[in-house]
Every structure is written in C-alpha cells, then in structure tokens.
Amino acid sequence: MELAGTLALLVVLSMIVEFVTDIIKKIIPLKEIGSVEVPLIISLIVGIVVALTTRANIFDGIGIVVDPIATAYIFTGIIISAGSKGVHELVSKLRESRKV
C-alpha cells in the first residue's frame, strides 16, 4: 500500500479507536488506578486489537520490513491509540521529514 493510502487508513482506524474508547470510558468511568490512567490503557488495548484484527501496518506504507509482523501491528496499534490528533501529528512529522 502506498504512503497516502496507509496514512488515510491510520486516520480512519484512529477515529474508530477514539469512538470505541469513548464508549468504553462511559461504561468504565474510572479515571485512574493508582498512578495509571485508565483511559490511556483502554485506548492502547483497543488500538492494538484493532491493528491486529485489521492487520494494519504503518511500516508497509513507508517501506520498512518488520519481523515478526505482529510487532508491526502492535506498534501501529500504539500509534492509532493516540487518536486522530496523534495520527495527524505523525503525518505532519512525516511530511516535514520528506521536505528535508
């Protein structure tokens, strides 16, 4: 998949993760357990599950081979767990790096 398609996929998946995370936060209204932020953990879990089940892989789009492939899915899940704002920041950084 080309870079533009990969980035579009990441944006869509991050919006799905945000939506699902918001629903789960309404069901589980805890903000913290000790010093750990519950919404962050929920978002990470949802992001990784979405990336694994959809086989989303940001590294394919930028031409990097990651082995084992599950590692690529996990890192992609962490990226999409940041939500659409986080993915937009990543896209901006990737665009800036292409200009150099």
Image: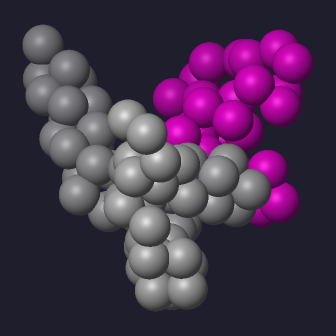
Give the quadrant of residue 63. Answer: top right
In the depicted view, which residue is nearer to us: 46 or 100? 46
Q: Position of residue 70 (x, y in %)?
A: 83, 31
In the rendered image, which quarter contains the C terminus? top left
- Count of numbered badges drawn on the protein: 0
Q: Is residue 74 magenta?
A: yes
Q: Which residue is rendered at x = 36% and y = 61% of the image?
A: 31
Give the quadrant of residue 59. Answer: top right
Would you say the magenta stretch is mainly helix, strand or loop? helix
In the displayed structure, 15 sits above or below 39; it is below
Q: Which residue is rendered at x = 53% and y = 40% of the image?
A: 78
Q: Position of residue 43 (x, y in %)?
A: 51, 57
In the depicted view, which residue is nearer to us: 93 or 35? 35
Left or right? Give the position of 100 relative to 18: left
In the displayed structure, 29 sits above or below 11; it is below
Give the quadrant of residue 49. Answer: bottom right
Q: Position of residue 17 (x, y in %)?
A: 52, 68
User: How is the rendered protein coloured?
Assistant: one colour
Q: Magenta stretch? A: 52-79
In the depicted view, which residue is nearer to us: 62 or 33? 33
Q: Is residue 48 magenta?
A: no
Q: Position of residue 8 (x, y in %)?
A: 44, 63
Q: Which residue is rendered at x = 20% and y = 31% of the image?
A: 93
Q: Residue furthest front?
A: 34
Q: Is residue 3 at all visible to an observer of this figure?
A: no
Q: Which residue is rendered at x = 70% and y = 29% of the image?
A: 72
Q: Is residue 24 at all visible to an observer of this figure?
A: yes
Left or right? Give the position of 89 relative to 74: left
